Amino acid sequence: MNSRIQGCYVAITGASSGIGEKIAIECAKNGAHLVLLARREEVLAKLSERIKLDYGVSCHYYSLDVQDLQSIQTVFSTIERDVGFVDILVNNAGFGIFNEVLHSSLDEMKSMFEVNVFGLVASTKMVLPAMMKRRKGHIINIASQAGKIATPKSSLYSASKHAVLGFTNSLRMEVKQHGIFVTSVNPGPIKTNFFTIADKQGDYVKNVERWMLDPNKVARIIVASMLTPRREINLPPWMNAGSTLYQVMPRLFEKLAGKAFFKK
């Protein structure tokens, strides 16, 4: 039980399914009020009703496409009017497409950066002023181990997650003096519907299925870390050890793990 978040307002982008949905439910279990954000309003409505009935907390929801920067401003202004302020923002919305850069379209590149990076930055900017004024808040950015270890067939996705990590690490230093925590979450593959888009052939899932993370466990770890100064959440630990080795000895790591890199 994370008593620190009881009564707090937690906003989650990409909350309609996958890890976003699991985080929302886990927050509700801990007594937090929810602000659910995603494109599929009808799905959010059902999740909101379920959370209110099961856990007795308030649960607002808003249709939001984080690719639309103007919509982000409009929706967060509405949240400020309806709720007052956001204590914790989980930037979870994101997607990837596994493909070699030669066979990736420029539209795919544009969309991945708009969702994974620009939407994340814009959403963060909308909640920071109130957090700084209150000297309290937590920004949690769902990045990826792909932001630490670049692999073939994920060049564009990996580049977007590298950007998320760079932004997160800089932001942490910028807002520390204002009492705001900033955490990056760097998971390996999680058993969610992420791969219905990223891995349409299903080859990658078949190759790594036995190592895939349980989304409920990931959600519990993230929620337990809310309103603490935890810098990073790296899952699974053995994969993060690999990313550390990669940063120290990239040539050796690429040589040893070369075949594994082509699992996609």
Image (cartoon, grey):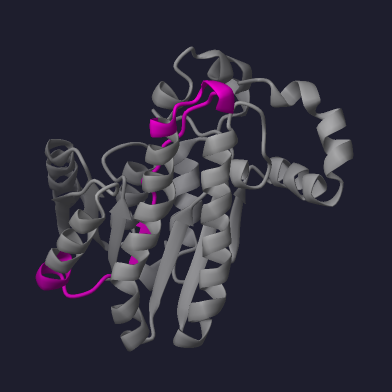
The residue drawn where x is 38% and y is 32% is 107
Q: Magenta span has 86? A: yes
Q: Position of residue 111 (x, y in %)?
A: 37, 39
Q: Position of residue 64 (x, y in %)?
A: 20, 49
| 110 over 182 or under it: above or below | above
The residue drawn where x is 23% and y is 52% is 36
Position of the N terminus, as image quadrant, is bottom left
Q: Magenta span has 240? A: no
Q: Is residue 89 visible?
A: no
- Please report the bounds of the magenta region as a residue range: 79-107
| Relative side of 106 to 54, left or right | right
Along the line of sight, the residue nearer the viewer: 138 or 122: 122
| Relative side of 40 to 175, left or right | left
Q: Position of residue 156 (x, y in %)?
A: 54, 37
The residue drawn where x is 40% and y is 25% is 197
Along the line of sight, the residue nearer the viewer: 53 or 112: 112
| 3 over 255 or under it: above or below | below
Quadrant in which residue 129 is drawn: bottom left
Position of the C terminus, as image quadrant, is top right
Q: Position of residue 109 (x, y in %)?
A: 45, 36
